[in-house]
Image: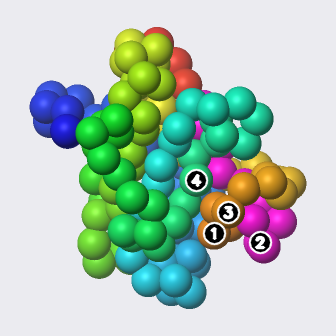
Amino acid sequence: MSLPPATDPVSLTPAAADLIRALREQHGPLMFHQSGGCCDGSAPMCYPAGEFRTGGSDVLLASLAVDGVPEPVEFWMSRSQWELWKHTRLTIDVVPGRGSGFSLEAPEGVRFLIRSHLA
């Protein structure tokens, strides 16, 4: 399921866009998924496109255009998490530190982080 294109609920900071460009160069096309679990499960996880299987319990929130990346980077979220966050706008940022997940940025010593504000 995807959202209507009225307003993109997801954006990127310049630091996140830079990291996405570097990861794209290393790993090819990318995607994000945010589950809504606890701890690092609540952080956006970056995978090679198609490596994380989405299904009926997920919502495509955005297809992000990143300068220097030839294809959109899809951002998926679990439907149950979106129900809780649907009144927010999300910004993908990067902070120092390593998460404990399988996200592609982990070896870089940084992690993606969601910053949110009410829409």
Horizontal side, residue 73 vs residue 51: left or right: left
Does residue 40 sit above or below 89 in this rendering?
below
Q: Main secondary structure of the magenta part?
A: strand
Q: Is residue 111 magenta?
A: yes
* Image x and y of residue 97, in percent: 86, 54
Tags 4 and 2 in contact by the CB under 8 Å rule?
Answer: no
Does residue 78 sit above or below 75 in this rendering?
above
Q: Residue furthest bottom?
A: 26
Q: Which residue is mark 2?
A: 108
Q: Alpha-carbon distance for marks 4 and 2?
A: 14 Å
Horizontal side, residue 97 vs residue 16: left or right: right
Tell me if residue 41 can be seen. Answer: yes
Q: Alpha-carbon distance for marks 3 and 2?
A: 12 Å
Q: Which residues are magenta?
A: 106-115
Q: Alpha-carbon distance for marks 1 and 3?
A: 6 Å
Tags 3 and 4 in contact by the CB under 8 Å rule?
Answer: yes
Q: Alpha-carbon distance for marks 4 and 1?
A: 8 Å
Identify the amino acid type marked 3.
Answer: Phe
Identify the amino acid type marked 1.
Answer: Leu
Q: Mark 3 against mark 2, which lies toward the viewer?
A: 3
* Image x and y of residue 10, in percent: 39, 38
Q: Mark 4 against mark 2, which lies toward the viewer?
A: 4
Q: Which residue is mark 1?
A: 104
Q: In what quadrant of the picture does the N terminus appear?
A: top left
Q: Which residue is mark 3?
A: 102
- The 10 Å Cα crowd at callout 1, few under 14, some 14 to 19, many 20 or more, is many
